[in-house]
Amino acid sequence: MPNRLFIKLLLGFWICSSLIIALVGLLPLLQQNHDRAPIPPHLQKVLASIAQRIQDNPELVTSDFLRRWERRGDMEGKPLRLYLANSQGQVINTNRVSRGVRSFMLMADEEKQPISHQFKDELVFGPHQFTLQGETYYLYGRLPDIHPRPWFFFFIENKLLTLSLAIVLSGLLCAILAWHLGKPLNSLKKSADALAEGDLSNRVDKATTQRNDEIGQLATAFNSMADSIEAMVKNQQRLMGDISHELRTPLTRLQLSLALARKKGQQTTETDRIAYEAEQLEKLIAELLELSRVKLSTNETKVCLGLAESLSQVLDDAEFEADQQGKKITIDIDEAIELSHYPKSLSRAIENLLRNAIRYAQSDIHLRASQANGQVQITIKDDGPGIDPAELEAIFKPFYRPDSARQRESGGWGLGLAITEAAISAHKGKIRAENRQPHGLEVNISLPT
């Protein structure tokens, strides 16, 4: 069936509004059918007997007979009150006619037959029509009576409450429909956000993909797209790793040839330059292989280990390097912090950040790690020149080197921070950098425990 989502929306709102209208509209009809009924035979017999007595004694019309009847009349222990109306509909035996009786007289006139009607606290019945001296009279009766009524008649008497409940009910039904449509869309949004943040393994849940409407079709298409993107990215990363690995073979031969030439005394300025470039190429290939390995998370298994224990060697090396350069590094890591991680990848990520901080800091570097709300927060600060704010988002991209205060004086290929970002992403974490005031750089890492 095409446009299933359109049909759900149409039927949902149509049924909701129709149900509310039907419930509100049927209540008066139900009340009328419940309260109005043909006159019971025993009440009809009472009216007939009184009418016959009036016909036999016409002077009773002008006397207080009907009033005296009320005082002595008894219907199952309840006082019976009678009303005698002429052909013009005027009650001639009393001036005190209740609103209920007047309403009943109009009902009975519309019905064209004797009926009874149950009001809130009285039962009115009639009329019994009879002729006296050529004029038509109508006799009505009234009994005080409280008849049990269905609970839902309460809403008829409380229209404001009924309107409020109708609004609440319609809101509830629309909320259920909105939840039915919004929940899978929210799941789809979360998967799209996760994919945009680099989590290529995230997929829309099965409950959404199994729906038989357009949302289910969209979720299935999204999962297929995510599968294709993940496969393409992984193939690209694997290709980069394979190419880097294959480049090592001719590079090794080149370095071997240079070693043989030097051994034969053929060392010149040109061979020294070739040796230098070959060494740089060897380092570049090593970095590319490391980036590929981290992105693919290959050859490493996650372990649950203390953060301080996992980073101990990296921190020792950083302290030594900082001391050699006359700089001070302050390390504050809670020994109780434990998390599931790839030790080698995480160590490499922290090592890259610390080396950058030591290289550009003027005198002080701070590393702090804390744990709260299921997250491990790692912060690395330095008092160096910082980075141009326009370049902060780009420093984690491969082969990007900022042309700012932190210049290219140190060489490199811009892969260190890319490896760091890849390692943090492999842990489902986040990393961001920001400048400090008055100067310096601060890198914040958030890792799930």
Image (cartoon, rainbow, N blue to C red):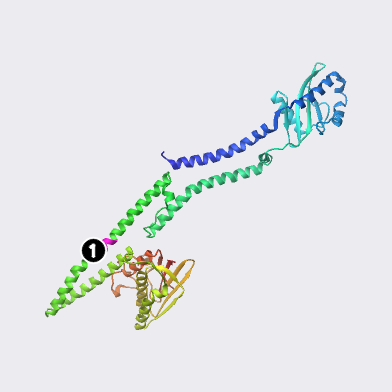
Residue at 33% from the left image edge and 57% from the top image edge: 230
Q: Count the marks: how many?
A: 1
* Left or right of residue 425, residue 252 in this image: left
Q: Could you tell me which quadrant the N terminus lies in? A: top left
Compared with 241, 212 (above or below) is above
* Residue 35 seen in render: yes
Q: SS of the residue at dot 1? A: helix
Q: Main secondary structure of the magenta part?
A: helix
Q: Is residue 115 magenta?
A: no
User: On the image, which quarter does residue 73 sit in?
Assistant: top right
User: On the image, which quarter does residue 427 sit in?
Assistant: bottom left
Q: Position of residue 23 (x, y in %)?
A: 60, 38
* Left or right of residue 122, residue 61 in this image: right
Q: Report the amino acid beneath label 1.
A: Ile
* Left or right of residue 292, residue 140 in this image: right
* Left or right of residue 157, residue 286 in this image: left
Residue interval drawn in magenta = 237-242
Q: Position of residue 253 (x, y in %)?
A: 17, 71
User: On the image, which quarter does residue 379 sit in?
Assistant: bottom left
Q: Position of residue 263 (x, y in %)?
A: 13, 79
Q: Position of residue 233 (x, y in %)?
A: 31, 58
* Residue 439 seen in render: no
Location of mark 1 (residue): 243
Q: Is residue 238 magenta?
A: yes
Q: Residues within 10 Å of mark 1 (few under 14, many from 20)?
A: some
Q: Could you tell me which quadrant the C terminus lies in? A: bottom left
Foreground pick, 117 / 192: 117
Residue at 50% from the left image edge and 47% from the top image edge: 178
